[in-house]
Amino acid sequence: MTTGVLIILGFVFFAALMATKKLQTLLALPLMAAWVSAVSGLSLPLYLNNVLLGGAMKLGSAMAVVIFGAMFARVIMKTGIADALIKTAAELAGDHPVTIALVMSLATVFVFLGVSGLGAVIMVGSIAIPIMTGAGIKPVDAVVLQLLAMGVGLAANTASYGIWIGIFGGAVIPSYYLPMFTASILLLLSYLFIYVRKPGSGSFGNFIIGVLKGIISLPCSLYGAVVRALRRKPSSLLKEKRSVPGAAFLAPLIPVVIVFGSKAVFGFGKAEDGMVDPVAAAVFGFICASLYAAVVVRPEQLVQVFTGALVDGIKDVAGVIFLFMGIGMLVASVMHPQVAAVLNPLLKSVVPESHWALFFFFAVLAPAALYRGPLNMFGMGAGIAVLFVSLGTIPGVVLCGIFLSVGAIQGADPTNSQNVWLSGFANVDVNDVLKRMLPFVWLECCVMLLYVTLTQW
């Protein structure tokens, strides 16, 4: 029991260092794994082989999906698809506040089905926020709408689930795409109609007409893309300025379609059983979507766009990859039988295990995900999730849903780089954004926790 107490005290110590920004998460998690190993009496060979090396490689599938997701995000930006989508939506939106807010939010949702990261936030926000504020929407509401819309898009973007895939496995993640997407888009629409004043008439109809025209023109757009690909010319060092065909806007949907198509046709499971690993399906989806986007927009520069996006994508997620290594080390240390033997009895005595006890526990403590707190999944929250998994008393699909639910709160965290940039760009206080968002994301968290409690046990 004394050893278990020392392990928990170590968790609390490193959590305090992360919360006070004395130590970065990238270093805190590997150090935490080393502490757990040392206190539990793991030999040096066991630590080096099973924790340091084995742990660093443990989340390999999660790293793969993040890398290929980042590559696709770079392709979307390099080909100008994301930028063109936002600008096209702006042209169709008209001049009424609710219509503009709705159209720009939906365009942002669509973009973040395929992209993520601060670069994408800057690209989209620098266009969308001035359009919304120019229509009379308050700057703080424009920022909140951008953040909520990003959350909706990322709810169906496999690359954004990297940490959850690494801890809980890829098989349970797709079951939460639709519930997370539905809950988050309902919250977005609720916020929009509560805080943005009522629209005039006509402009939303124009938007719908424009979208329908775009859908009707897709076959011609695809035909034109095929013709250009067949007439491929040697690439030039100078990038030719050209319009993005409407068919290119389908690219963000391709990974989602392939993931769910694989599930419908093959099912998720082992290849020996004729099934497909969901992470493999996601990686394949990102590759197909990247090739499609490059061929449709820049067929003559396919190789350059694809390889350049892969290199830039790896640079974008280098920090995330090392974070995954640290999480893997912590998972390997906590899950080691020698550690579990001393830690689990202590945890079982304090961790609630009944359905509703867990619901109220996480519903009340969910704001602890803010300010890099103990439930932040990009910090100490990953360690706590690992502790819950090590118990083995709560189904993995339930734990995954619980920590995904709490993750909704992180969208309002004032320490997020995207929150800071968007608030600064719109000239509003990032804490005002938090006050505006918190009731909505907390409600989303509780709705998702209720869904998990009622459907997944």
Image: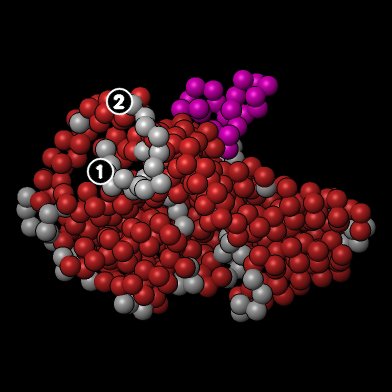
Badge 1 local density, few (<14 within 10 Å), some, or many (20+)?
few
Residue identified by numbered label 2: 227
User: Is residue 451 at all visible to an observer of this figure?
Assistant: no
Q: Which residues are magenta?
A: 260-281
Q: Residue at x 12, y 59 (%)?
A: 96
Q: Is residue 409 left or right of residue 122?
A: right
Q: Nearer the viewer, residue 121 or 148?
A: 121
Compare marks 1 and 2 and give the one earlier in the sequence.
2
Q: Position of residue 280 (x, y in %)?
A: 58, 34
Which one is nearer the viewer's eye here, 216 or 428?
A: 216
Q: Position of residue 170 (x, y in %)?
A: 59, 40
Q: Is residue 60 left or right of residue 212?
A: right
In which quadrant is the C terminus drawn?
top right
Badge 1 marks a residue whose secondary structure is loop
Q: Which mark is residue 243?
A: 1
Colour approach in the figure: secondary structure
Q: Nearer the viewer, residue 307 or 48?
A: 307
Disc 2 marks a residue whose amino acid type is Val
> What's under tag 1, amino acid-wise?
Ser
